[in-house]
């Protein structure tokens, strides 16, 4: 077993519960945007190819939103990465070294995907729109796979030595591995994609009800049916891969710890059942088409992402417990720096929401008039 780096004598800059709460909230913001590009871009490409007139219109609306969504998701993604490095640095950096080249390749893939979504959104040539969409969608799916590798490897210390022996040269890791032998990786990665499908469906509901109000009734009815079908698909996908993850991949130690605490067991049950609420709200929205119902769908979906983040954080803490006592780490509070971060973060979120609202309202009207 590879020994851990020594604990920092500086300790944590804030109580552990606060650091993890900020991490979970930041991850929820990041995941909301990330789901839209992770599943939304492949769905946009498929609709552009086989979706007919309405499918091409919705693909255009999804594609037009992607530059904004990616910008928000990338910036929000800094928050969970920051707090992961603060709390779990001994695990995060070791795992990063072992898969260094795939991990660093995310930067190049992200640049390709970012340029691709702009071409997809702004190009007037159908061939270029489709090609850039396919390249962007493929790059983003690969990024999600590498992230899943990194985060599963971070909590699987026994796998560290196996990867080290397999890839080391003259006693130094080459960083060319991926954590492919981890049984948690496939269901976790697929479960994330299933949840991303549901988030994309919830976004389609919100877009149709709020930003495409001037679209004809035929398009709005078609979009509602598609959103309901996509959410149903994502719900089944999430349930199947989540069951695989909980009952077939998690270690018995984690499952026993889960069963030993009724509150945690209830949290896991809530995590499994919560996606049913947006599904029901979409079913009602299809009949009433009220914007307030679409807003409830979006809010409920964000809550589901948050609940999943909380559940995953608990599982991660249990997985790391044999190797490090995070609770016992000393705290040397740096309240000035933390307060500055929180103020800047809240201002940034407010500005991001305002900018996104202005941009979406502008292009939404243009897109509705030109393509529906």
Image (cartoon, rainbow, N blue to C red):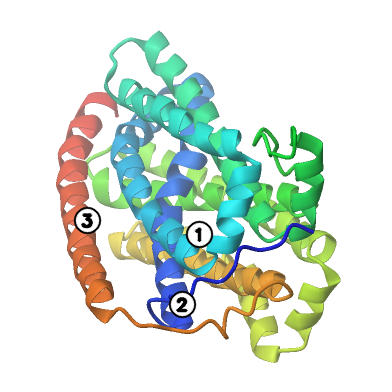
Dot 2: within a 10 Å radius of its alpha carbon, few (fewer than 14), some, or many (20 or more) residues?
some
Sequence-earlier tag: 1 or 2: 2
The mark lying in front, picked from 1 and 2, is: 2
Image quadrant holding the C terminus, namely top left
Tell me what residue is drawn at x 71 percent, y 62 percent. Answer: 3
Measured from the top left, where is residue 206 in percent x and y? 35, 52
Out of 128 and 318, give the one closest to the viewer: 318
Measured from the top left, where is residue 144 in percent x and y? 56, 42
Asked whether residue 43 appears in the rendered view, the answer is no
Image quadrant holding the N terminus, namely bottom right
Residue linked to disc 1: 283
Measured from the top left, where is residue 292 in percent x and y? 30, 65
What element does badge 2 sit on? Answer: loop
Tell me what residue is drawn at x 22 percent, y 56 percent. Answer: 353
Position of 155 with respect to 214 (left or right) is: right
Examine the image and state in which quarter residue 14 appears. Answer: bottom left
Dot 1: within a 10 Å radius of its alpha carbon, few (fewer than 14), some, or many (20 or more) residues?
some
Asked whether residue 23 appears in the rendered view, the answer is yes
* Alpha carbon separation for disc pair 1 and 3: 28 Å
The vertical placement of 183 against 313, above or below, is above
* Alpha carbon separation for disc pair 3 and 2: 35 Å
Sequence-earlier tag: 3 or 2: 2
Measured from the top left, where is residue 140 in percent x and y? 50, 34
What element does badge 3 sit on? Answer: helix
What element does badge 1 sit on? Answer: helix
Residue linked to disc 3: 353
Circles 3 and 2: CB atoms closer than 8 Å: no
Examine the image and state in which quarter residue 332 appears. Answer: bottom left
Tell me what residue is drawn at x 19 percent, y 35 percent. Answer: 363
Residue linked to disc 2: 11
* Alpha carbon separation for disc pair 1 and 2: 50 Å
Sequence-earlier tag: 1 or 3: 1
């Amino acid at each position: 077993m590879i020994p851990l780096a020594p604990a920092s004598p500086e300790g944590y800059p804030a109580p552990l519960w606060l650091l993890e709460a900020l991490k979970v909230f930041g991850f929820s913001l990041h995941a909301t945007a990330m789901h839209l590009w992770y599943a939304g871009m492949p769905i946009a490409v498929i609709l552009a190819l086989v979706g007919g007139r309405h499918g091409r219109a919705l693909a255009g609306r999804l594609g037009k939103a992607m530059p904004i969504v990616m910008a928000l998701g990338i910036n929000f993604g800094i928050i969970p990465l920051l707090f992961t490095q603060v709390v779990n640095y001994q695990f995060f950096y070791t795992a990063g070294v072992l898969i260094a080249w795939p991990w660093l390749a995310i930067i190049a893939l992200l640049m390709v995907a970012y340029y691709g979504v702009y071409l997809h959104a702004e190009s007037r040539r159908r061939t270029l729109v489709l090609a850039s969409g396919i390249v962007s969608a493929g790059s983003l799916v690969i990024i999600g796979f590498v992230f899943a590798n990194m985060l599963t490897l971070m909590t699987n210390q026994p796998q560290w030595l196996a990867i080290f022996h397999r890839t080391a040269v003259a006693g130094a890791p080459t960083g060319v591995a991926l954590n492919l032998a981890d049984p948690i990786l496939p269901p976790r990665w697929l479960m994330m994609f299933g949840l991303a499908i549901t988030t994309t469906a919830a976004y389609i509901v919100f877009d149709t009800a709020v930003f495409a109000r001037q679209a004809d009734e035929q398009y709005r009815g078609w979009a509602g049916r598609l959103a309901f079908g996509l959410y149903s698909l994502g719900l089944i996908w999430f349930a199947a891969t989540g069951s695989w993850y909980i009952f077939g991949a998690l270690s018995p130690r984690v499952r026993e710890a889960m069963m030993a605490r009724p509150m945690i067991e209830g949290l896991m049950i809530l995590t499994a059942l919560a996606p049913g609420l947006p599904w029901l709200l979409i079913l009602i929205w299809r009949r009433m088409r009220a914007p307030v119902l679409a807003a409830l769908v979006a809010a409920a979906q964000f809550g589901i992402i948050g609940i999943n983040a909380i559940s995953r954080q608990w599982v991660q803490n249990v997985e790391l417990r044999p190797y490090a006592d995070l609770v016992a780490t000393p705290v040397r509070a740096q309240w000035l720096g933390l307060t500055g971060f929180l103020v800047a973060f809240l201002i940034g979120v407010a500005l991001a929401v305002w900018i996104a609202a202005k941009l979406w309202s502008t292009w939404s009207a243009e897109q509705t008039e030109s393509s529906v």
